[in-house]
């Protein structure tokens, strides 16, 4: 899809042909960087300037493409983003105009998206995304943060499936997300599954953590202390910082794979260790560990979870996977597991 290239890698989307080609792609937006996305594409004049800005930038740094990580269209993200009922229409107009540009026409274009299609003017998921599929090479579904500190129980960060879960626990999954986007007109081979190398931690009392009458079998969807703000691993440094909207931040509580292994909660191959209660949920195909001494439960993807997602990619004929983030892995155990199962 893209040719071998230079060195500025902000976010790398892993394509099937990773072994022979590495592409440098700039990602624009993100959770903290989407305040003015709506404005940048919000008028014909602004779109002309934005097309010029990004094409000059990719030329200057000899990039292969662009990734659009707008969080989110006509839906509030960080808290102070500009949003507009016409966001989705304006974004597709921007993509069309970018493709009409001689540089834009040659770029590898992707978008990082939610588990439901972009909101329409009524703040409902759009039913027709086929126009986007014409301009974008790939869409990466960010199938993570489905459950977290905002949820009412401990649940899977990145569920593969949830149809097998109790109705109230069906908050979205890779299976339903791919179905949503396919139904809206995006071909499966253009869909890339976003996977997470980190998990979320929760303060869970011992009495809630275990199935009644056991001391080793972890309970599903236990209650947790919503007041507690747990620190995750050493990358989790957001205590008392101020975000772009001026709001104070607390710890996110995330644990990357390298940290789970470093803390002795898994062995060096990502397998459970004796003495650390572990559960693999057969519906979401994701893992949990519990630290009784600290009353902390962590929901995450281990190599088995990644292998299940790789199998799904293969079975569905998806375009590949994208990982947030490669540096969260340990000795490539997650990347190797998903690539092997996907047959890459
Ligand atoms: C919404 O955006 C589209 C595409 O740019 C444009 O054709 C349409 O006039 C816009 N509608 C409003 C109400 O701004
Ligand atoms: C929940 O966490 C808060 C903040 O750390 C703490 O003050 C409180 O005692 C905890 N509640 C329980 C029931 O442990
Ligand atoms: C956050 O930082 C403040 C000030 O350094 C400190 O008092 C507080 O204990 C920290 N919170 C946690 C959960 O570590």
Image: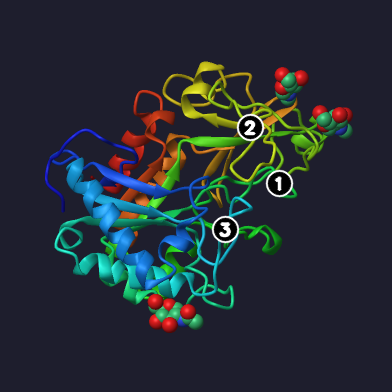
- Answer with the quarter of the image where residue 106 lies: bottom left
Label 1–label 2 contact, CB within 8 A:
no
Q: Quadrant of the C terminus?
A: top left
Report which residue position mark 3 lands on.
162
Mark 1: secondary structure: loop
Mark 1 or 2: in front is 2
First-in-chain label (3 vs 1) = 3
Q: CA distance from mark 1 to mark 2?
A: 18 Å
**Quadrant holding ligand 2?**
top right
**Relative to 154, does residue 47 appear above or below in the rendering?**
below
Q: In front: 23, or 97?
A: 97
Residue drawn at 53 percent across, 51 percent down: 159
From the viewer's perspective, is 61 left or right of 221? left
Q: Position of residue 323 (x, y in %)?
A: 39, 42
Residue drawn at 19 percent across, 65 percent down: 101
Q: Position of residue 205 (x, y in %)?
A: 80, 31
Residue drawn at 17 percent across, 43 percent down: 62
Report which residue position mark 1 lands on.
221
Q: In front: 321, or 209?
A: 321
Q: Most extreme residue toward the front, as rendered?
A: 45
Label 3–label 1 contact, CB within 8 A:
no
Mark 2: secondary structure: loop
Residue drawn at 30 percent across, 65 percent down: 48
Mark 3: secondary structure: loop
Report which residue position mark 2 lands on.
253
């Amino acid at each position: 899809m893209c040719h071998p290239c230079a060195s500025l890698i902000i976010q790398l989307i892993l394509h099937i042909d990773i072994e022979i080609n590495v592409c440098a792609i700039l990602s624009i937006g993100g959770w903290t960087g989407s305040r003015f996305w709506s404005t940048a594409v919000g008028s014909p004049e602004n779109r002309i300037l934005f097309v010029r800005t990004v094409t000059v930038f990719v030329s200057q740094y000899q990039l292969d493409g662009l990734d659009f990580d707008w969080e989110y269209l006509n839906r509030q993200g960080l808290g102070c983003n500009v949003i507009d009922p016409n966001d989705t229409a304006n974004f597709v107009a921007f993509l069309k105009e970018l493709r009409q540009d001689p540089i834009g026409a040659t770029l590898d274009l992707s978008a990082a998206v939610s588990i439901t299609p972009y909101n329409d003017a009524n703040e409902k998921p759009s039913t027709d995304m086929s126009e986007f599929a014409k301009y974008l090479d790939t869409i990466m579904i960010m199938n993570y943060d489905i459950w977290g500190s905002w949820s009412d129980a401990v649940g899977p960060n990145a569920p593969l499936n949830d149809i097998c879960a109790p109705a109230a626990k069906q908050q979205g999954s890779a299976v339903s997300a791919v179905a949503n986007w396919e139904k809206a007109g995006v071909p499966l081979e253009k869909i890339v599954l976003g996977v997470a190398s980190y998990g979320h931690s929760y303060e869970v009392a011992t009495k809630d953590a275990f199935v009644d009458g056991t001391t080793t079998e972890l309970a599903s969807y236990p209650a947790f202390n919503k007041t507690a703000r747990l620190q995750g691993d050493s990358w989790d440094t957001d205590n008392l910082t101020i975000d772009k909207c001026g709001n104070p931040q607390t710890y996110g509580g995330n644990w990357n794979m390298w940290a789970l292994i470093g803390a002795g909660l898994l062995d060096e191959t990502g397998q459970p260790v004796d003495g650390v209660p572990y559960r693999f949920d057969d519906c979401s195909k994701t893992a949990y560990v519990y630290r009784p001494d600290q009353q902390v439960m962590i929901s995450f993807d281990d190599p088995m979870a990644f292998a299940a997602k790789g199998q799904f990619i293969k079975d569905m004929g998806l375009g590949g996977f994208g990982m947030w983030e490669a540096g969260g892995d340990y000795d490539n155990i997650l990347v190797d597991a998903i690539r092997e199962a996907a047959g890459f």
